[in-house]
Image (spheres, rainbow, N blue to C red):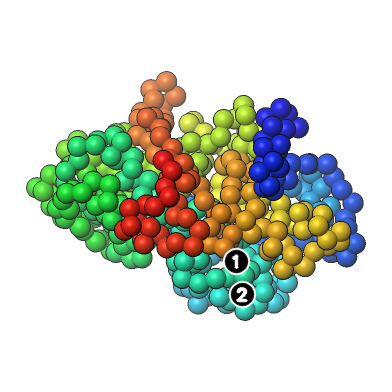
C-alpha cells in the first residue's frame, strides 16, 4: 500500500467510512460457496453496444480477472455470466428471472437502459436478488420507491444536465438564449427538463427559443439544423448519444451550426473522435474527462493498463464512462461482501451484504464512490465537463478547459427529489 492509499484509508477511517484496501489472498470463511456466480448484463448487440455495452462488458471482464488473481471475493473465485441486455423490457425481465432462478447467480451487475433498470428493480426485490446497476441514469429508481436489494454505484442523470448548466454559465456567463434538440423518449425529455429548469434557476431571464424532438435514430437532422440556423440561439443543448450524436455532430459541423452556436452535450455517449472540436461535453462521474491522477490512484492506473493490454485504447486513452461504471459496481459488490464477511465471521447472507453496501464509501478506478443518497442505495459523483479540442501532436481529440463540479454541488441531499431540489434553488448545494 503506498503513501496515498495509507493516508486515504486513515482519513476515511477517521470519518467512520468504509474502504477496503487489502489485496492479500484470504482463506474462505465458514459457509462459503465453491464459487461466486455474478451476472454481468450489458448491451452486447444493437445500437447501444458500441458506445456503452461492449466497453462496459470488457471492463467487467478485466476487473473480474484482476479480482480473481488477487484471491477472488472473500477467497472465492468469481464466475461471470455475461448476458446481452438487448431487447424490450419484458424480455430483459424474463432474462433477469432466469439468471436468478435457473443460473442461481449470487448477484446481478449491470444494465445501461433506464427503462430496463425501472423494470428490473421491483423484480429484484421480489426475488431477493442482490442487484447493482452499472450505468443507467434515471433518478426515478430511488426517488419513486425504495428497493431493499437494488443499488446503483454511479450517479444518476441529474448531474449530467445540471452540470451542463453550471459549466455553460462558467464558460459563457452572458448567455441569453438556449435551444434544445433531444431524442423523443424518456432520456431526451428528462435531460432537457433538468437542463432548462436548472438554467432558469441559475440564470433567470434566459430565453428558450426552440425545443426539437426528433425520433431516436432518425439519422437526418437537416430540418432541425435549418431551424436552429435561423433562430441563432447562443447555445444548443443536446443529450444525443451513439450514432445519433455522431450523425448530428457531423451534419451540424457541415452546416456551420457549431460555428454559430455553442453546442453543449450533457454526457459522453460516443468516442470523441467523432465529435467536432469546440463542442462542450460532460461525463457522469470522473470517467474519461477527469479520471483520478494515475500517479495518485493506483486503481485507475491499473485499470488503464489492464484494459489497454487486453482490448486496446484510442491514442488519447479514451475509455467510455460505462466502462468505469461497471468497475464501480464490481468494486462496490466486492467491498460489501468482504465487509459483511468481516462483521459476520462467516459467509454472509444477501441481506448482510446489502446492509454493508448501503451508505458505504469505497475506492474504484474512477476515484472514491459514496453511497450517500436514496437511503444509501444511490451513489453521488462529481460532474466533469470540458471542451473538445484537436491535438495535432497525437492526432486525436482531447479534453481541454476541464472543470469538475463536486458531488455536493450537483447531487440533491438524501431524501429530496431532484426536481424539487432544483426548483427550490439547490438548498444545501456546495459548489
Q: Estimate the x, y position of residue 317 in percent, counting from the top left.
A: 52, 33
Q: Residue at x 38, y 22 (%)?
A: 392
Tell me the number on the disc at residue 8.
Answer: none
Q: Is residue 321 above or below residue 174?
A: below
Residue 273 horizontal side relative to residue 126, left or right: left
Q: Estimate the x, y position of residue 177 in percent, counting from the top left.
A: 16, 46
Q: Quadrant of the N terminus?
A: top right
Q: Circle 2: is it few (<14), some (14-19), or many (20+) Cα within 10 Å?
A: some
Q: Quadrant of the C terminus?
A: top left
Contact check, label 1 and label 2, Cβ < 8 Å: yes
When asked about the image quadrant of residue 417, the answer is bottom left
Q: Residue at x 73, y 45 (%)?
A: 20
Residue 316 horizontal side relative to residue 9, left or right: left
Q: CA distance from mark 1 to mark 2?
A: 7 Å
Q: Estimate the x, y position of residue 103 in percent, counting from the top left.
A: 71, 71
* Residue closest to the eye, 11 or 94: 11
Does residue 415 appear in this view?
Answer: yes
Q: Which residue is mark 1?
A: 150
Q: Which residue is mark 2?
A: 125
* Residue closest to the eye, 290 or 307: 290
Q: Secondary structure at mark 1?
A: strand
Q: Estimate the x, y position of residue 32 in percent, counting from the top left.
A: 85, 62
Q: Residue at x 12, y 44 (%)?
A: 232
- In the picture as drawn, the residue positioned furthest to the left comes out as 230
Q: Earlier in the sequence, mark 1 or mark 2?
A: 2
* Residue closest to the eye, 278 or 298: 298
Residue 325 horizontal side relative to residue 65, left or right: left
Amino acid at each position: 500500500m503506498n503513501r496515498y492509499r495509507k493516508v486515504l484509508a486513515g482519513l476515511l477511517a477517521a470519518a467512520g467510512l468504509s474502504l477496503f484496501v487489502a489485496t492479500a489472498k484470504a482463506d474462505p470463511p465458514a459457509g462459503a460457496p465453491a464459487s461466486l456466480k455474478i451476472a454481468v448484463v450489458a448491451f452486447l448487440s444493437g445500437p447501444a453496444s458500441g458506445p456503452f455495452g461492449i466497453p462496459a462488458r470488457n471492463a467487467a471482464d478485466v476487473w473480474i480477472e484482476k479480482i480473481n488473481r488477487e484471491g477472488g471475493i472473500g477467497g472465492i473465485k468469481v464466475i461471470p455470466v455475461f448476458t446481452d441486455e438487448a431487447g424490450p423490457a419484458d424480455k430483459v425481465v424474463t432474462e433477469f428471472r432466469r439468471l436468478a432462478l435457473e443460473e442461481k447467480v449470487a448477484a446481478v451487475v449491470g444494465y445501461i437502459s433506464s427503462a430496463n433498470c425501472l423494470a428490473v428493480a421491483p423484480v429484484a426485490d421480489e426475488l431477493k436478488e442482490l442487484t447493482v446497476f452499472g450505468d443507467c441514469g434515471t433518478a426515478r429508481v430511488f426517488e419513486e420507491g425504495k428497493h431493499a436489494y437494488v443499488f446503483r454505484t454511479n450517479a444518476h442523470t441529474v448531474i449530467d444536465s445540471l452540470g451542463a448548466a453550471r459549466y455553460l454559465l462558467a464558460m459563457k456567463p452572458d448567455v441569453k438564449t438556449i435551444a434544445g434538440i433531444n431524442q423523443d423518449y424518456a432520456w431526451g425529455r428528462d435531460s432537457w427538463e433538468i437542463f432548462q429548469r436548472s438554467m432558469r434557476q441559475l440564470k433567470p431571464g434566459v430565453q428558450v427559443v426552440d425545443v426539437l424532438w426528433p425520433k431516436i435514430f432518425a439519422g437526418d437532422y437537416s430540418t432541425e439544423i435549418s431551424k436552429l440556423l435561423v433562430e441563432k440561439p447562443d447555445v444548443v443543448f443536446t443529450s444525443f448519444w451513439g450514432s445519433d450524436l455522431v450523425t448530428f455532430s457531423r451534419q451540424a459541423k457541415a452546416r456551420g451550426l457549431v460555428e454559430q452556436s455553442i453546442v453543449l452535450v450533457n454526457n459522453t455517449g460516443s468516442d470523441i473522435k467523432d465529435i467536432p472540436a469546440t463542442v462542450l461535453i460532460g461525463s457522469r462521474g470522473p470517467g474519461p474527462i477527469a479520471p483520478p491522477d494515475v500517479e495518485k490512484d493506483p486503481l485507475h492506473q491499473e485499470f488503464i493498463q489492464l484494459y489497454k493490454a487486453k482490448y486496446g485504447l484510442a491514442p488519447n486513452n479514451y475509455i467510455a464512462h460505462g466502462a468505469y461504471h461497471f468497475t464501480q459496481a464490481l468494486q462496490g459488490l466486492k467491498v460489501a461482501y468482504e465487509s459483511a464477511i468481516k462483521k459476520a465471521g462467516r459467509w454472509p447472507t444477501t441481506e448482510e451484504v446489502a446492509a454493508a453496501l448501503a451508505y458505504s464509501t469505497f475506492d474504484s478506478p474512477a476515484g472514491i464512490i459514496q453511497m450517500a443518497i436514496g437511503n444509501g442505495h444511490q451513489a453521488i459523483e462529481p460532474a466533469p465537463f470540458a471542451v473538445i479540442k484537436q491535438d495535432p501532436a497525437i492526432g486525436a481529440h482531447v479534453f481541454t478547459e476541464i472543470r469538475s463540479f463536486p458531488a455536493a454541488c450537483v447531487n440533491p441531499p438524501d431524501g429530496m427529489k431532484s426536481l424539487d431540489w432544483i426548483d427550490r434553488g439547490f438548498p444545501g448545494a456546495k459548489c
